Amino acid sequence: MRLPRGIRRLFRVDVLTSRVEKEIDDEIGHHFEEAVRAYRKAGLDEQEARVRARSRFGDERAYRQALKTIDRGRVGMRERSEWIDAWGRSLSFVWRGLRHSPGFTFSVVSILALGIGANGVMFGVVDRLLLSPPQHIVDADEVKLLHVRRIGFNGDVFTGSTITYPDLVDLQAVDAFRAVAGYTEPIEKTLGRGSDARQISAVEATASLFPLLGVEPFMGRFFTDDEDAVSAAPTVVLAHEFWERELGSDPSALGTRLEIDQGSYTVIGIAPPGFTGPQLSPVDAWVPANVSKAIENDGETQWREHRGWYWIKVVARLAPGAAIEAAAAEATAAHRGGRAAMISEDRYDEGAEVLVSSVIAARGPAASSESSVARWLAGVSIVVLIIACFNVANLLLARSMRRRRETAVRLALGVGRWQLVRDSVLESLVLAALGAAAAVVVGRSLGDAVHQALLPGISFNDTGLGGRLLVFTLAATLVTGLVTGLIPAHQSARGEPGEVLRGGARSGADGRSRLRAPLLLGQAALSVVLLVGAGLFVQSLDRARALDLGFDPDGLVVTTLEWNETLPADVRARIYDEVETAINRLPSVASAALTYTVPFRSSISLGQPRVPGRDSIPKHHSGGPYVNKVGAGYFETMGLSILEGRGIEQTDQAAGAPPVTVLSESMARAIWPDESAVGQCLVFEDQEDATCTQVVGVVENHRRQALLEDDHFLYYVNEGHPAFQGPPQALMVRLRSDDAGPGPGRLRTEARSVSSQIRFVGADPLTAYVEPQLRSWRLGASMFTVFGFLALVVAAWGLYSTLAFDVALRRHEIGVRSALGADRNRIVGLILRQAIFLAGAGIGIGLVVAAALAGYVEPLLFQISGRDPLTYAWVAATLLLTAVVAGVLPARRATRVDPREALQAD
């Protein structure tokens, strides 16, 4: 029975939104005509009946609008229900398919987990270095780091991140800054006494640092301006992580006293979790800068008054409305004003300028090389994800080819092409989601270890899945799912089902097979780029490690002493002598010698010496000359070769011994280019009757502070030299190469037994001071190698899967060839030639891309060209060998094709 028009709409489940208005018009018209007929039956004529019906009917527009609202809501609800039901059916279908193909599912999820996981880890690094300000800084856009760019005495322009304390005072008067604070890099300080003493990382900061940053203490309070006065009682704020690790999160730690260096500091506060100040280095404690420096320097105040004592960094918060350019100009004027006397005496650059930059140090003028490498590695991780996407798209294409008959049957049964596309995209999204979940689990498990291995000097305190990382992971998952699913989805919806069902095993597959080749070429080309980068960074690291420093750092241990209390210089010198004697008696020690400075750790310059009878000596572009006071046997202990004369001997250390000096080769050749320096005289004092210091030897040049530095002027003097007063600062210990050595623990024990005044003994391998300068090359070598290896494995798997499927696809062709007399070798050659061709084309493309990018990466390399032919050849050979290996198994399968079965199957 047909329903009346007036109520038919209520049961119409297939009504479309575009038909709602027509249905409403029909319904209102129906009710209006019924009213007109009723009035006509009552005796009214047509016109009056219509007037009465319209009057009785009321506001037709209001009815129409109310019905529209009702119908649209009902239609929307039905459409949403149908949409959810359709996607639910598709999801159920996709999930069943994945469960029935566990090998395929595992392969795809593993590949995507590698790609998304690598990107997640690298995004964490990039976010920490380049995107996010240090934690707990309020309104970080207003907080700026200050640097000074100037021309040094050697004529080079450099940008310094540290200034002097008087410079800090000058900047604090700049009106464009609401507040200015000073702080140091984390400094190793000794905590505790005796055998329990250990070193912690502490920052010396002015009291204005904490309110400037806007940070609130987790517990207690921060120190005030009065507590930062030179004569104030020492106080300390502990890092939250140190409080948890060392004090067990004990609230009663507030008010306790900690013995730090020669001071007794009262704990007044605990910083919030993850707080590192305006820098990213891990910190254990914050101490008032003025108090700590006064204790370090036995109450002397040169560090506070002298404009040659660079030790403090500066951070500022802009005043409301202040522009960065105006603040920089005002700060520059204040800096030059404070240096006016030095500028007038030509002792300072009159063009020095203050730079105002982001609190994110990697965006500033003094960005580390690790930041530059991190940018490249972020791009590399994206390349890995692209390779993973290509590989997964290849696998999905192969899967769609294997299921083409099933797809044709579904199309023949009336399934729409849009539904096929939806199923294909949904399958890739599900796989991407599973890969992302696996990537998050692996990232949470290995993230901290990776961060510490790559950037040990950076604090990564947030081990949870942060908001930025979560958004990035979700975005990467969505993009990966769409990219890997759209190509197979497009292919699945193409073709006529009848043709596929009639055409047998080969029908419809050729186009998809041709589509897989470009994806494979892309994988190979990108793998080449990554492997070239890995080779270049590995060689840079090897060359940096093999660099001749002038001395052999392996087996050298830097031994330093900390004191229980302030001791006179002569007492400290005597104790160092006794420690040297005690350590030299150890059987595993080859030699030990005293020194004032340590390569790659410290250096000092005392001004220009002069030669009697000359106005001046040549100046070196690297500055200096630099000086070191050393004990007997220093050159032998360091492994420095004496080129002429002799070194500093024990007789030179005796009381009353004449002053002597040993010059570096570059200094000796510059002053006496045409004659021997041995026996010559140098004067190190300004007085006319100053004592002549005899040159007794010339030693080979060595690196002073950096791997990438030129030879410099350096001279060594003996103990008691009038130009250089003060006790030794370290003991260099050379361990025997044929013995494991006593180790730091034994050295500390032996040294501590010499005197009760020794509070702590430091024993660090000299390589620990050299290694940080290798960090950028190690970071590049490690990550390029890991990512390159992953890319190689993924590309090899992609090539193998392509060849394996092509063998299955060409089963008929191979059967025909075998039937016509082709032997096993020809069939193997057929498959391997295809593998080599695909790999060779990808290698060629990749080498061209790598060469084009070489100019950008060369500044990060060490003594190697970005187009090094040996590296390129090694990478090409590796990829070709991988292609051959990947093609062996499909080639063997091809030789096992039975011609009769292949022809009958087709």
Image: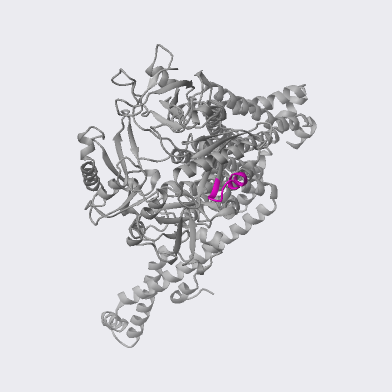
Asked if residue 454 shows in the view, the reply is yes
Q: Residue at x 32, y 61 (%)?
A: 226
Residue 833, x across and y down, in percent: 65, 24
Quadrant in which the N terminus appears: bottom right
295 vs 208, nearest the viewer: 295
Residue 712, x across and y down, in percent: 41, 26
Residue 191, x across and y down, in percent: 51, 54
- From the viewer's perspective, tell me whether residue 163 is left or right of residue 486: left
390 vs 77, nearest the viewer: 390
Q: Magenta stretch: give its range.
A: 748-761
Q: Is residue 361 inside the magenta stretch?
A: no
Vertical side of 9 occupied by 217: above or below: above
Vertical side of 298 occupied by 245: above or below: below
Residue 813, x across and y down, in percent: 70, 29
Vertical side of 222 occupied by 826: above or below: above
Give the quadrant of residue 693: top left
Q: Residue at x 77, y 24 (%)?
A: 824
Asked if residue 479 shows in the view, the reply is no
Check the image and name the residue furthest to the front: 656
Quadrant in which the C terminus appears: top right
